[in-house]
């Protein structure tokens, strides 16, 4: 059975103590997408790691906006930084690539968008089987 649902958007302060809310929202979206329990656990960990990618910068963004979409059994999480341009203290490109590899091991696809040395977007995708 292929699942689909309208987008779910969550905006949270870019703070470590908000990661529980991200995990719980991820669990709800994953359940609606029809993922297995194992895939749900892996994707929740990937969502938390994706947020950690933003938080590990010298100057984290003010907020994160996470959007969950599911079309034809394909769940996508897009996490965007809400911050003004010109903030200092980005992320080392090698560190970003290591994080991307970890994310790719937890889901089917992982992309990290870096602009001006800062993480601007992380996109994760998982196919329900």
Image (tube, rainbow, N blue to C red):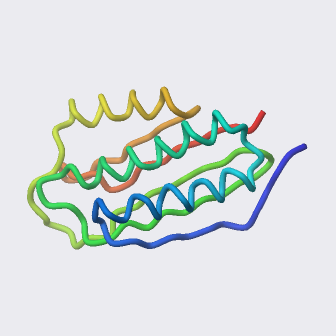
Residue 78: image x %, image y %?
50, 55
Residue lying at 25% horizontally and 55% vertically, measured from the top left? 55
Please say if 89 is above or below 62.
Answer: above
Say which residue appears at 61% left-offset and 54% top-offset.
27
Residue 52 pos. (x, y %):
31, 49
Tell me what residue is drawn at x 57 percent, y 40 percent: 41
Quarter residue 11 falls in: bottom left
- In the rendered image, residue 2, in percent from the top left (x then y), is placed at 86, 46
Q: Is residue 73 above or below residue 10?
A: above
State which quadrant residue 98 falls in: top left
Q: Residue at x 22, y 73 (%)?
A: 84
Instruction: Locate the N terminus by quadrant.
Output: top right
In the image, residue 82 sits, relative to residue 117, either above or below, namely: below
Q: How many marks?
A: 0
Foreground residue, 110 or 51? 51
Using the rendered view, name the quadrant where residue 29 is placed.
bottom right
Q: Quadrant of the C terminus?
A: top right
Quick check: 24 above or below 37? below
Nearer to us in this view, 114 or 57: 57
User: In this image, 16 relative to 37: left or right?
Assistant: left
Q: Is residue 80 left or right of residue 106?
A: left
- Residue 38 image point, x, y percent: 64, 33
């Amino acid at each position: 059975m292929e699942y689909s649902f309208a987008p779910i958007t969550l905006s949270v302060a870019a703070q470590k103590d908000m990661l529980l809310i991200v995990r719980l929202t991820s669990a709800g979206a994953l359940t609606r997408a029809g993922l297995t329990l194992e895939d749900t656990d892996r994707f929740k960990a990937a969502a938390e790691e994706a947020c950690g990618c933003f938080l590990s910068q010298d100057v984290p963004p003010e907020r994160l906006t996470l959007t969950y979409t599911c079309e034809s059994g394909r769940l996508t999480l897009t996490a965007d930084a809400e911050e003004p341009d010109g903030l200092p203290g980005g992320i080392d490109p090698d560190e970003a690539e290591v994080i991307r590899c970890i994310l790719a091991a937890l889901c089917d696809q992982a992309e990290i968008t870096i602009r001006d040395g800062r993480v601007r977007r992380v996109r994760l995708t998982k196919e329900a089987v």
